[in-house]
Amino acid sequence: MSKRLSSKYKIDRRLGVNLWGRPKSPINNREYGPGQHGQRRKKPSDFGIQLMAKQKLKGYYGNIGEKQFRKYFAEATRRKGDTGENLVGLLEQRLDAVVYRAKFVPTVFAARQFVNHGHVEVNGKRVNIPSYIVKEGDVVTVRTKSKEIPMVLEAVASAEREIPDYIDADHNKLSATFVRVPKLEDIPYPVQMEPNLVIEFYSR
């Protein structure tokens, strides 16, 4: 597993967007990159635009490693239909993404750690792999021992995000059913995602 040394706020500033739509993001006050030369933004090339689209998508899902992200691209290409739609659908099928969408935790990064630490079950079986692909109809549940964790209680009570309609969540039972694989237009990204540019990047 690759080390993710850059904080989520640095990712926000590097990309110049409030990637997760969070009120505390520094990009709300400083719309330039981190570091000494952060304010020198040049007009990006076509390659730069495609790279930025890829970095946004990778970053949004907890800064996924390049090797793993390429595997998602390969699988999206293999599947029938629009490759860009397939790619975002696959990313939303990740177990940590489902945990985040169901509002069991406050952030994507917390979702990865939450799954890693064994707090989640899929169809009654403990799963601790954040990249586990959830299928339509699968039921994701917070384990009984983990239901009183303060972070979970705070996330459930928070009004910061809404649960999309492709996730059927029951916060009383702390369980969520993955109803269907979403299309791009269904996914509540706080910023514009351009998976078509990501496909162009890898198809160069």
Image (cartoon, grey):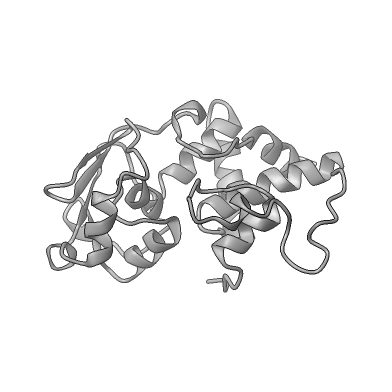
In x, y percent, where is residue 11? 62, 59
Residue 3 horizontal side relative to residue 116, left or right: right
Front-most of residues 133 and 64: 64
The image quarter in which residue 34 lies: bottom right
- Taking the spot 44% from the left edge, 28% from the top edge, the residue there is 186
Residue 106 horizontal side relative to residue 44, left or right: left
Residue 16 horizontal side relative to residue 85, left or right: right
Whether 30 is drawn above or below 129: the answer is: above
Quadrant for the C terminus in the image? top right
In x, y percent, where is residue 35? 75, 68
In x, y percent, where is residue 194? 64, 35
Please say whether residue 70 is visible from this viewpoint: no
- Taking the spot 57% from the left edge, 74% from the top edge, the residue there is 3
- Taking the spot 31% from the left edge, 44% from the top edge, the residue there is 159
- Taking the spot 60% from the left edge, 33% from the top edge, the residue there is 84
The image quarter in which residue 161 lies: top left
Please say whether residue 139 is visible from this viewpoint: yes
Whether 107 is drawn above or below 190: the answer is: below
The image quarter in which residue 135 lies: top left
Give the number of callouts: 0
